[in-house]
Image (tube, rainbow, N blue to C red):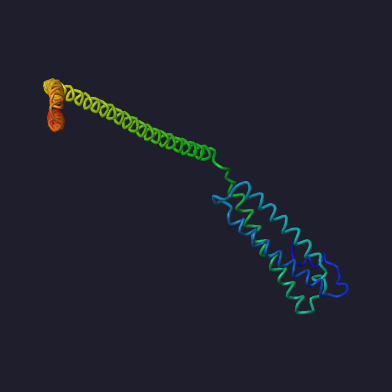
């Protein structure tokens, strides 16, 4: 569609031209933006980004530009004689945008014929899937190894604890056996001491019997003496007391030694 065609299809200007010129300027701006985006898509044809999705975007962009051209060319601001400087500038801008689009459109047609869109490689997809599976397997393997390592550490700790408990129990048994041996030694020492002191105990018994006999004799003598004299009776009594004390002292000394 040429600029002359746009002039022939346009209608005469009716009413105030300011709103119309604003609409035309807005349409030209949108066309510039759309053509720039279309050019970027055309530049991607034949590259690694050239996919069926890119071709769909190209068709959509081309359709969008055609719609904007129709809307802008239908504005009456371009159909009137270009007598004002602003209207002349708008007409030139619109013509420049159309010329730019025609160049890009021609380049797009040439590239679309020369290059076919590349679909995602199935082998690459399978390779990626295999890599993901390998990574998953490696991650699971690392997890299992770490789990086993922790289990071994826990088992070693449990074994060490059980060994410490067994050692402590054995030491306790040894201590009890040692205490029992010490008690048996004490009993043996007591038995030996009693056996060694048995003659002394027999001597003490004899001394007690002898002392008792002496006391009895002293008592009889004292009774006899009391008949003759009160003083002699008192003396005998004290003699008896002294003999008893001497006997007790001898007995105590024998028990001690």
> Taking 192 as reference, is 103 left or right?
right
Q: Is residue 197 visible?
A: no
Q: Is residue 192 above or below residue 116?
A: above
Q: Quadrant of residue 169?
A: top left
Q: Quadrant of residue 102?
A: bottom right
Q: Residue at x 40, y 33 (%)?
A: 151
Q: Residue furthest right?
A: 15
> Taking 3 as reference, is 117 left or right?
left
> Taking 204 as reference, is 85 left or right?
right
Q: At which x and y percent is residue 8?
A: 82, 66
Task: State the count of labels.
Answer: 0
Location of the C terminus by quadrant is top left
Q: Quadrant of residue 2?
A: bottom right
Q: Is residue 47 visible?
A: yes
Location of the N terminus by quadrant is bottom right
Q: At which x and y percent is residue 3?
A: 75, 67
Q: Is residue 51 above or below residue 68?
A: above
Q: Residue at x 66, y 52 (%)?
A: 57
Q: Residue furthest front?
A: 228
Q: Is residue 16 above or below residue 157?
A: below
> Taking 20 as reference, is 121 left or right?
left
Q: At which x and y percent is residue 183?
A: 23, 26
Q: Residue at x 72, y 57 (%)?
A: 64
Q: Nearer the viewer, residue 227 or 193?
A: 227
Q: Nearer the viewer, residue 82 or 169?
A: 169
Q: At which x and y percent is residue 51?
A: 60, 47
Q: Nearer the viewer, residue 256 or 139?
A: 256
Q: Nearer the viewer, residue 26 or 142?
A: 142
């Amino acid at each position: 569609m040429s600029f002359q065609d746009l002039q022939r299809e346009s209608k005469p200007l009716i009413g105030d031209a300011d709103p119309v010129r604003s609409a035309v300027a807005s349409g030209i701006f949108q066309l510039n933006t759309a053509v720039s985006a279309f050019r970027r898509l055309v530049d991607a044809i034949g590259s690694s980004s050239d996919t069926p999705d890119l071709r769909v975007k190209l068709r959509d962009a081309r359709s969008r530009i055609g719609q904007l051209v129709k809307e802008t060319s239908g504005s009456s601001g371009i159909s009137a004689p270009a007598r004002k400087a602003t209207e002349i500038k708008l007409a030139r801008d619109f013509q420049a945008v159309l010329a730019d689009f025609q160049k890009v459109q021609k380049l797009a047609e040439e590239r679309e014929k020369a290059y076919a869109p590349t679909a995602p490689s199935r082998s690459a997809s399978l390779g990626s899937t295999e890599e993901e599976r390998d990574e998953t397997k490696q991650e699971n393997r690392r997890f299992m190894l770490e789990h086993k390592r922790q289990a071994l550490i826990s088992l070693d700790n449990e074994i060490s604890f059980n060994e410490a408990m067994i050692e402590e129990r054995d030491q306790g048994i040894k201590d009890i056996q040692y205490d029992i041996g010490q008690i048996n030694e004490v009993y043996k020492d007591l038995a030996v001491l009693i056996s060694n002191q048995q003659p002394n105990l027999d001597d003490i018994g004899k001394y007690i019997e002898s002392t008792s006999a002496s006391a009895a004799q002293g008592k009889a003598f004292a009774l006899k003496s009391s008949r003759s004299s009160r003083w002699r009776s008192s003396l005998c009594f004290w003699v008896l007391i002294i003999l008893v004390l001497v006997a007790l002292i001898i007995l105590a000394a024998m028990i001690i030694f």
